[in-house]
Amino acid sequence: MEKTVSEAIKFRRSVRVFKPDTPLDDNKVKDCIANAVLAPTSSNMQLWEFYQITNEELLKKMTKACLGQNAAKTAQQLVVIVTRKDLWRKRAKANVDFLKSQYGSKDKTEYTKREKFALNYYEKLIPSIYFDFLGILGGLKFIVFQAIGLFKPIYRQVRNSDMRIVAHKSAGLAAQNFMTGMAAIGYDTCPMEGSDTKLVKSILKLPRGAEINMVVACGIRAENGIYGPRFRVPFEEVYYKLD
């Protein structure tokens, strides 16, 4: 029986040691990845990819790339979450194609104001934000947008480094969806940021524009798999209600 959302969130812990002889169902893990892609993503750009690793040789190589961490060493599977900011043109076009399929076959002059806005968002605004050349255009856009911001509220994160952060934030939301989904079916995970990302990219044969968001170790927790009780700073220190 699957856990509720609250139960899954409370069940999820960063497990450092997994049982060695308790395999996971590949399809169930895949289903959790399918739930990951339902996470919210900036402008619906979906600049992410997910790599489910079950091959033993690849797992050994990935353990080395993950600096020999116990979570990687004992994992039954690894899921690598990758950001693909370099695919912004392809993903923007996919959104345009989807919108046009929803609007039906019609001439451009027949689009409603709302439909035109949505299409212009992906055909004009997204390119103006994502396109850059050696960081130069991003710097110029940053100056222009900051100047406009002196007179009215405006989106200011337009540099190449800003868009990288946007892609990683979206990937992080997907990662949480994945880990919560795994917890709901009694599977354990451990998100690992500590890795040689260049080596991980080499193992996965990823292109230059791809970036590693995190590697998630997967398995069933061993008795010593959780290193200690959960600690969080008092809720009152992080919660603010503005009436």
Image: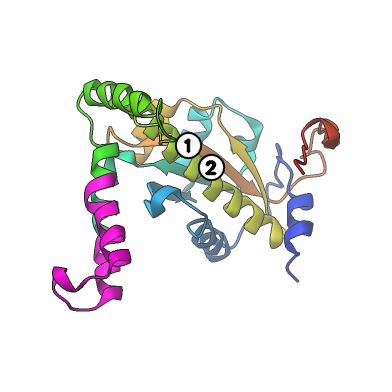
Residue 138 falls in which quadrant of the image? Answer: top left
User: Residue flagged by tag 1: what amino acid is it?
Assistant: Asn
Residue appearing at x 46%, y 25% in the figure: 196
Task: Please tell me whether mark 2 or mark 1 is closer to you in this view.
Answer: 2
Q: Is residue 32 left or right of residue 233?
A: left
Q: Is residue 102 magenta?
A: yes
Residue 15: x %, y % from top left: 71, 41
**Judging from the image, what secondary structure is the residue with disc 2 in?**
helix
User: Residue flagged by tag 2: what amino acid is it?
Assistant: Gly
Residue appearing at x 60%, y 48% in the figure: 176
> Which image quadrant: the N terminus?
bottom right
Main SS, magenta residues = helix
In the picture of the structure, the residue carrying the numbered disc 2 is 172
Q: Is residue 51 left or right of residue 122?
A: right
Direction bottom: furthest residue: 105
**Judging from the image, what secondary structure is the residue with disc 1 in?**
strand
Location of residue 5 with respect to 60 vertically, above or below: below
Residue 98: x %, y % from top left: 29, 67
Residue appearing at x 78%, y 52% in the figure: 11
Q: Earlier in the sequence, mark 2 or mark 1?
A: 2
Labels 2 and 1 touching (C-beta < 8 A):
yes
Residue 58 falls in which quadrant of the image? Answer: top left
> Which image quadrant: the C terminus?
top right
In the picture of the structure, the residue carrying the numbered disc 1 is 213
Residue 227: x %, y % from top left: 80, 33
Q: Is residue 145 magenta?
A: no
Residue 137 falls in which quadrant of the image? Answer: top left
